[in-house]
Image (cartoon, rainbow, N blue to C red):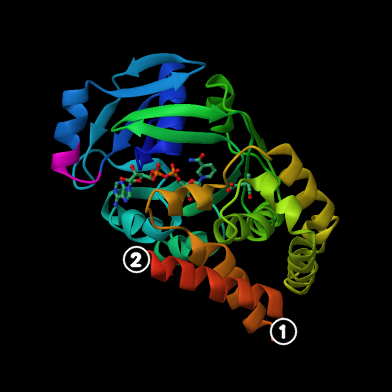
Amino acid sequence: MSWHVLGAGSLGGLWAARLARAGVPVKLILRDQASLTRYRAAGGLTLVEDGQANLHPIAAETPNHGAPIRRLLVACKAYDAEEATAALAPRLAPGAEIILLQNGLGSQEAVAARLPRARCVFASSTEGAFREGDFRVVYAGRGHTWLGVQGERRTPEWLDDLHTAAIPHQWTHDILAKLWRKLALNCAINPLTVLHDCRNGGLRDWPQEVAGLCTELAELLRQAGQPDAAEDLHAEVLRVIDGTAANYSSMYQDVAQGRRTEIAYLLGHACTQAERLQLKLPHLDDLLQRLREHLTARGLPVT
Ligand code: NAD
Ligand code: KPL
């Protein structure tokens, strides 16, 4: 059975190239005919791994054309996922499975609500990839992808494809805990690196601010029914700051390159959930306010 990959960017390209080179049938779904023409002119998708570039002539199509879709990997940004996926609704076969690679929370539920007959699998990835050019992806950081349907322990048979393609992964029955934990880490680190204009390691100069955010984020996680995700959050945030000290956070890089951020699905989602739970989290609210002002001053969306 063929995989369809929607979004031939960094993570979509990384997944598609590894599946294709392992002999797993895969097709890319590109935005439109113009994008398909450029892709064909490039001769395929190039994956750069350990300094070695390899071209993968993976089949590609536009959203409106092609066979029914049974297994769809959605690799768009969180703010594009709902519309991009909904546009494929007429092509989804009964019982289709949709694997959602988006960071943060909120976009997955939006996709699931638009496509109630599909089975949505959520994913949380610590792999790193970036686009060096059109249809040219660099595998920048080894990591791991958690996949799951909340509460479901039975693993799908397509995990074998990921194994064959050497995509490091693990199934979990508590994917929401993984997504919340990553969201909390991202909320404690990424906005501050933007506001203080620093690498992750630069946050060692702001210990009180980091600690205050971690206290509020842990409270939010507990109240949101995610006590496991709250466990030792501050200690892990400090470990990540140390372990990635030389790196710029993904949000820092987005802002530096004038790209839209996923703020609404990270810090924005945290603050919305706190409000819903009638929790007062002044440090988080203040951080969101400052970040929005920062983005607005640079002409970037705040949603
Ligand atoms: P990206 O911007 O590199 O790629 C997204 C791709 O989706 C782009 O090629 C874009 O053109 C395409 N797209 C958008 N709308 C589309 C549509 N309607 N039809 C077809 N294609 C469409 O983004 P990315 O870095 O791969 O991130 C994807 C998601 O994965 C994000 O939520 C991100 O936070 C998450 N993530 C990324 C990384 C990473 O290292 N890149 C790591 C972990 C998680
Ligand atoms: O995931 C990250 C990111 O930059 O988005 C880390 C390195 C964990 C920082 O929050």
Q: Is residue 206 above or below residue 126?
A: below
Give the vertical position of 114 relative to 69 (above or below): below
Left or right of 55: which side holds 120?
right
Q: Distance between the residues labelled 2 and 1?
A: 29 Å
Provide the secondary structure element on which disc 1 rests.
loop
Check residue 33 for magenta coloring: yes
Q: Where is residue 74 in the image (x, y as percent from the top left)?
A: 42, 46
Checking the image for residue 299, the label placed there is: 2
Task: Residue 87 in the image: state x and y as whole percent.
Answer: 28, 56
Is the stretch drawn in magenta largely helix, strand or loop?
A: helix
- The three-letter amino acid code for the residue at tag 1 is Lys
- Front: mark 2 or 1: 2
Work out whether residue 216 or residue 227 is closer to the camera in this orientation and state it: 216
Q: In which quarter of the image is the C terminus?
A: bottom left
Q: Report if residue 114 lies within the magenta region.
A: no
Q: Residue at x 79, y 64 (%)?
A: 208
Q: Left or right: 84 with respect to 51?
A: left
Residue 109 visible in rendering = no
Q: Mark 1 points at which residue?
A: 280
Tell which of 141 and 273 is nearer to you: 141
Which element carries disc 2, helix, strand or loop? loop
Which amino acid type is marked by label 2?
Gly
Whole-percent x, y for residue 24 in the image = 43, 22
Q: Disc 2 or 1, which lies upstream in sequence?
A: 1
Would you place residue 247 above or below residue 79 in this image? above
Neighbor class of circle 1 (other Cα within 10 Å; few <14, some 14-19, many 20+) is few
Q: What stretch is highlighted in magenta?
A: 31-35
